[in-house]
Image (cartoon, grey):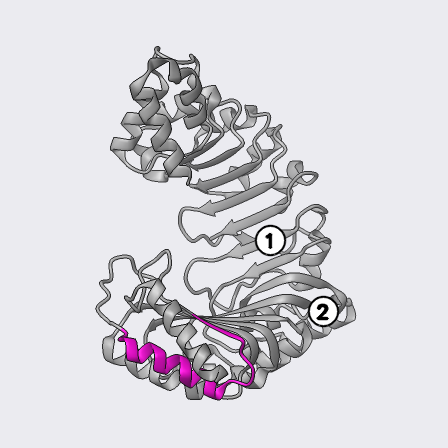
Amino acid sequence: MELAYRTCVLRLMETCRAFYSIGVPFLLRQKVSLNTEDVFKSFCNFLFATSPGPSNRPTLLRDLRIPDYMVKNNKSMVLQIISGATYLRSLHIYLPESATEFRNVLAGFSDLRELRIELDPGKSATEALRWFEQIRSPIETLWIQLCIPSLQRVALSSLSPLASTLRSLTLDRAKLDSMDINVEFPNVRELYLKEFGRRSTEYFPPSSAAIFKIFPNLESLAVPTFDTLSARQLSGYDDRVQEATDLGVHRKHLKSLEGCLSELIWGGYICSADDLCLWVGSCWEWDSGDASFLLSRTRPSTFQLALFIESFTLDMIPIIEDVPSLGSFKEIYILICVNEPDDDAALELTRSLPEALRGVDTELLTLDFQVSSLDTECHFLMHEFDIEEFFLQIHAVARKPRTIVIEPHHTRKAIFDVPVDFVESARRKCLDATAE
């Protein structure tokens, strides 16, 4: 709908120059993403045009996104754009090392609410964030991504000027300093500690006790970093769980809790949650005992199992077979995301899924198949009979699913290259058949 409005406005502007006074502000107040050189050049020509339409167009910008390669190739022009965009409310941008001019401009904004920065930390990630002390904007959503995975730890005290307004914080490829617990962010409701790749056992996020001390009013917490060990194989496991128990972490309640199984348990994140999502990065890191332990304490109504595996393998089946024994849930969402799809392995896996889910107890079951690599071509086709038969088999083994959904299409390439309307048709046929 937004694209349709933009196209309509552009056509009106081409028809009559008088529409520029209305069309230019409308277009510039939409989300602007400068993803390619051609788009960047066209945008600059439009932005700095002297006529027709309003002058000083950069001040009309509200939501601007500029990836790292565009900043590196057009540093001076990007700086000119954001210097004039004094009323920005959302900005996604890359900050190179020693980018003093960029930092001075950002510090001068007065109404910036969302800031996502890709940061080249140089020698010190904490020092690179010192300029936050100069920020005057009431930033509510902050995403800090280090350009490369770093062993450096980010001191939250660097962000203390935002403590009164910040509601959502994401640290991507940046490790949180567990010793920096004297600062408090009472208004933060969402915390996302995102890593890149697999981490060693030498570093984990701070324990749940430290997290809830720094962020006392958290509602959503995500620590989705893979590990190759189960929680009970990590040193200090019993101490962490006991510490969380002694401090009453189990009395905390979250709307959503997300992360690697071993990390959640080892960190003592045993509070209750409405929505629990477990990330699995390898078949050998799954531990059914750990899963049962965590679910018995979180008691979620919605359970999500996200399998991020290199390729289709029947080693996934034992993990999925544990799902029915983990309890009854209002919703169950199972994501299978692979890097390299294999036709035969995919077909063999889907044939094994219904039996693996025997006895699953939920009102809504969603199965989502994805390919993580955008460069991968998908050739696997699921025929009409296969889908209908698949639905029927799931209904036959499940206890009480009112609705079963297969998500064959996603923002990334789909495993099952079939029309969405056909999948819905097959599901309805299955529901009608089972109702009879």
Q: CA distance from mark 2 to mark 1?
A: 18 Å
Q: Residue at x 49, y 64 (%)?
A: 225
Q: Is residue 52 left or right of residue 63?
A: left
Q: Nearer the viewer, mark 2 or mark 1?
A: 1
> Which disc number belongs to residue 191?
1
For residue 353, above or below residue 277: below
10 Å neighbourhood of mark 2: few (<14), some, or many (≥20)?
A: many
> In the structure shown, which secondary structural element does the residue marked by tag 2 occupy?
helix
User: Would you say residue 371 is visible in this rendering?
Assistant: no
Magenta-colored stretch includes residue 177:
no
Name the residue beneath numbered marker 2: 244
Residue 346 occupies quadrant: bottom left
Disc 2 residue type? Ala
Closer to the camera in the image, 47 or 285 = 47
Q: Residue at x 30, y 80 (%)?
A: 386
For residue 236, above or below residue 85: below
Residue 113 rendering spot, x and y as whole percentages: 58, 35
* Farthest-out residue, front: 436
Closer to the camera in the image, 191 or 326 = 326
